[in-house]
Amino acid sequence: MSELYGETHRAFQDAHGTRPLADRLESLAHSTFEPNDRAFIEGVTFFFLSTVDARGRPTVNYKGGPPGFVRVVGPAELVFPVYDGNGMYLSLGNIAASSQVGLLFIDFESPRRLRVQGTARVAPVDELPGQFPGAQHLVRITASQVFVNCGRYIHKLESKKLSPHVPDAAGRQPFPAWKRIDVIADALPEADQARVARAGGTLSVAEYPGEDLPDHEGERT
């Protein structure tokens, strides 16, 4: 009985003669992190997280941070921080409704991919006090399958420069320019509306400069 494949997967595998290959790849999947998995995961600066809401609708989010922001904390468990975002909390809301998740780690230089399937829960930051500066929440994931994925179609990227918005060692980060966009600013929490005013007021969509150079860089909180 396969843990990864159902009848629809088998139909495509049989049509292309890959059922033995698919079975071999499943046999190589593991439920605990091996040393090379841990080294890869703890060296990344981003990954992609898929979650499912209460109505079965999937979404995929990009999660980024400094090297080591994802940590393997047990034989089959990893943890990562959730920083300030756009206020939608799609990933956290989905995890609270349906714990099934998928993670995709990519090395654009080697190239290499690693997939993790498992279950997740949202945890308070004080479960690991002081270890994730700037985090609002933690997400803990228990892996069910960990497996390497073909990397041949991964395109190489030139720069490994981190986003200037990654929280510093004290958990501070610059105020994002997108929060100054006029069609968004009046819906912000009061504290952020005050920061918009201190940064010089709102911007039109046409004036939005992107996030390469953080807006109002001198104010990091």
Image (cartoon, rainbow, N blue to C red):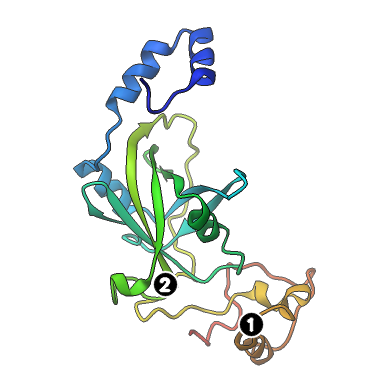
Q: Confirm whether residue 70 shows in the render.
A: no
Quick one: quadrant of the N terminus? Answer: top left
User: Would you name the residue on which mark 1 appears?
Assistant: 189
Residue 10 point in image, percent of width and height: 48, 15
User: Would you name the residue on which mark 2 appears?
Assistant: 135
Q: Nearer the viewer, residue 180 or 138?
A: 138
Q: Residue at x 61, y 65 (%)?
A: 88
Residue 13 point in image, percent of width and height: 48, 14
State whether residue 97 is above or below residue 58: below
Tell me the SS state at disc 2. Answer: loop
Residue 159 point in image, percent of width and height: 46, 54
Quick one: label 1 or label 2, which is nearer the N terminus?
2
Q: Residues within 10 Å of mark 2 (few under 14, many from 20)?
A: some
Q: Residue at x 76, y 78 (%)?
A: 203
Name the mark on residue 30. Answer: none
State whether residue 23 is above or below residue 140: above
Say whether residue 176 is left or right of residue 181: left
Amino acid type indicated by mark 2: Ala
Q: Residue at x 24, y 43 (%)?
A: 33
Say whether residue 90 is left or right of residue 63: right
Rounded to the nearest angstrom, the CA distance separating label 1 from label 2 is: 18 Å
Say whether residue 112 is left or right of residue 178: left
Q: Residues within 10 Å of mark 1 (few under 14, many from 20)?
A: few
Q: Residue at x 53, y 87 (%)?
A: 219
Q: Nearer the viewer, residue 59 or 199?
A: 59
Q: Nearer the viewer, residue 29 or 153?
A: 29
Tell me the SS state at disc 1. Answer: loop
Q: Confirm whether residue 194 shows in the render.
A: yes
